[in-house]
């Protein structure tokens, strides 16, 4: 199935609207289309063709967006490269690409030059929904990042499903401070082009810059993870004037954090998603937030979710990457969860993370959620450690809050934290040990806990 090329359609409908806004400048849809066309010409001169991979190793910003849209206009497959990786890791991501873009494309070719391109070099007037558009590398929480092809159809259906859940404001300004090498950040640029709205891009998450944007720059949507939401709340975020929703996911979102955000006048929509499903799978609708319902969300429009007998979450529908589907037609996520009577999904953990202690199964995320309700706990991780008596001993690794004015840790100790858990959990789930840690817990750039490094 073919659909009109997104960027050209957005430019035709909203030529003067700001398409991209960054700390270093902004551009209208007319300028974005012209720049993307000019960069596509340069890519062809460097050997790029339809269906070939183009690695983009640029910081988040205008030049990255020009290169991305140039690939989509050309029909080349964009491969974002995470610049925080080592040189060897970046090289592995870029392997197989016909062109590596590691410096801004010239973009000085005249738009008329693009009319001379033909065959595999011709610019797309439409997108084939079955064709691969982007290769994203999974976040690597349990292993090395793996490449996954997402199609134009995956991207389009994800954008439509998100809009049904969150609504769409004609004057939308979606703030992205997530890495563009991961699906959560990259999808904001793509969705905004599909909608014809504004994407506000920060090169990296900086608490004060995000706080200022939310308070002063008419941001209507923002994508965060639990740790970054906590940081802007710690910095004083309160009643952001234009914000419709802070979409928060990338891992478990503690209920205490959602309650804290709500008390500060920050509307939070919790979301669950994966690279394989082109970002969101379930999202709490904005309509539910208005009714003070901050529970888990239902599946996105046209996405299907069910839980297998062992509790594994299975996903199907047009947002799921074709290569990620099992023979039974479902994406086996490796995550554990449960659906309530209204079809709302609660995620309880990872199958691979399950701790078997004394013959009982323990979900680390459940214990972590309880620990993070303690007012002195900044973040917590729970792992199973080999134990001669229990097989695996439930072990908590906790980072305590710092009192900003005194720059000292609070006095909460292991016994107090175990007692806190005992008040809310079955005895076999209570950590046998609690280890206090000074430095932050290891996480991917998208905010997911790297449990394997603990």
Image (cartoon, helix red, strand yellow):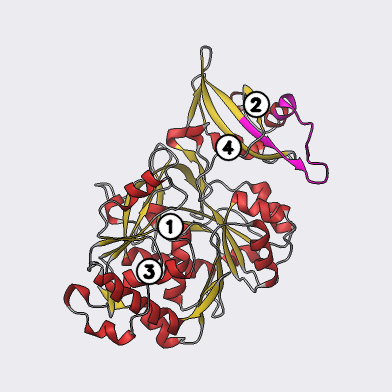
Q: Are marks 2 and 1 in contact (CB under 8 Å)?
A: no
Q: Is 413 part of what is drawn in magenta?
A: yes
- Tag 1 secondary structure: helix
Against 148, is 381 above or below? above
Task: Report whether 142 appears left or right of 218.
Answer: left
Q: Are marks 3 and 2 in contact (CB under 8 Å)?
A: no
Q: Nearer the viewer, mark 4 or mark 2?
A: 2
Residue 128 seen in the figure:
no
User: Mark 1 highlights which residue?
Assistant: 183
Q: Residue at x 38, y 69 (%)?
A: 67
Q: Who comes first in sequence, dot 4 or dot 3?
A: 3
Span colored in magenta: 397-417
State the separation of the CA atoms marked 1 and 3.
17 Å
Within 10 Å of the Cα at label 3, are there few (<14), some (14-19), or many (20+) other Cα atoms?
A: many
Q: Who comes first in sequence, dot 2 or dot 1?
A: 1
- Tag 3 secondary structure: helix
User: Mark 4 highlights which residue?
Assistant: 366
Q: Quadrant of residue 25?
A: bottom right
Pick whichever, 421 or 9, lies toward us. 9
Q: Nearer the viewer, mark 1 or mark 3?
A: 3
Q: Residue at x 21, y 74 (%)?
A: 121
State the separation of the CA atoms marked 3 and 2.
48 Å
User: Mark 2 highlights which residue?
Assistant: 434
x and y percentages locating residue 316 in the rendered image: 35, 55
x and y percentages locating residue 328 in the rendered image: 26, 47
User: Mark 3 highlights which residue?
Assistant: 67
Q: Who comes first in sequence, dot 1 or dot 3?
A: 3
State the separation of the CA atoms marked 1 and 4.
26 Å
């Amino acid at each position: 199935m073919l659909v009109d090329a997104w960027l050209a359609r957005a430019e035709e409908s909203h030529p003067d609207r700001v398409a991209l806004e960054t700390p270093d400048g902004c551009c209208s849809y007319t300028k974005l289309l012209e720049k993307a066309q000019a960069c596509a010409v340069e890519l062809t001169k460097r050997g790029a063709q339809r269906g070939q991979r183009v690695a983009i190793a640029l910081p988040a910003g205008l030049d990255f967006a020009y290169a991305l849209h140039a690939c989509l206009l050309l029909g080349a497959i964009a491969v974002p490269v995470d610049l925080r990786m080592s040189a060897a890791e970046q090289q592995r991501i870029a392997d197989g690409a016909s062109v590596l873009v590691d410096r801004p494309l010239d973009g000085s070719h005249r738009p008329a030059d693009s009319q001379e391109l033909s065959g595999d070099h011709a610019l797309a007037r439409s997108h084939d929904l079955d064709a691969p558009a982007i290769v994203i590398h999974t976040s690597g929480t349990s292993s090395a990042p793996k490449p996954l092809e997402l199609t134009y159809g995956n991207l389009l259906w994800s954008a439509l499903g998100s809009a049904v859940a969150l609504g769409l404001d004609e004057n939308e300004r979606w703030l992205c401070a997530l890495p563009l090498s991961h699906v959560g950040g990259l999808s904001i640029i793509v969705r905004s082009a599909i909608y014809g709205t504004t994407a506000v891009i920060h090169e990296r998450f900086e608490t004060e810059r995000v706080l200022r944007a939310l308070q002063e720059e008419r941001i209507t949507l923002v994508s965060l993870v639990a740790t970054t939401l906590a940081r802007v709340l710690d910095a004083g975020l309160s009643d952001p004037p234009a914000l419709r929703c802070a979409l928060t996911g990338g891992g478990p979102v503690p209920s205490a954090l959602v309650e804290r955000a709500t008390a500060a006048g920050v509307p939070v929509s919790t979301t669950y998603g994966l690279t394989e499903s082109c970002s969101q799978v379930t999202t709490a609708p904005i309509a539910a937030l208005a009714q003070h319902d901050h529970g888990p969300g239902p599946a996105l429009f046209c996405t299907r979710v069910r839980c297998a007998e062992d509790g594994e979450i299975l996903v199907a529908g047009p947002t799921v990457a074709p290569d990620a589907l099992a023979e039974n037609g479902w994406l086996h996520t490796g995550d554990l969860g449960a659906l309530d009577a209204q079809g709302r999904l609660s995620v309880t953990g990872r199958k691979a993370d399950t701790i078997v202690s004394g013959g009982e199964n323990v979900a680390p995320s459940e214990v972590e959620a309880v620990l993070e309700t303690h007012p002195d706990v900044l973040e917590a991780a729970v792992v199973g450690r080999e134990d001669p008596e229990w097989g695996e001993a439930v072990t908590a690794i906790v980072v305590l809050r710092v009192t900003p004015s005194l720059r000292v840790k609070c006095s909460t100790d292991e016994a107090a934290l175990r007692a806190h858990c005992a008040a809310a959990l079955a005895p076999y789930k209570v950590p046998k040990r609690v280890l206090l840690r000074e430095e932050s817990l290891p996480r991917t750039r998208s905010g997911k806990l790297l449990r394997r490094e603990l």
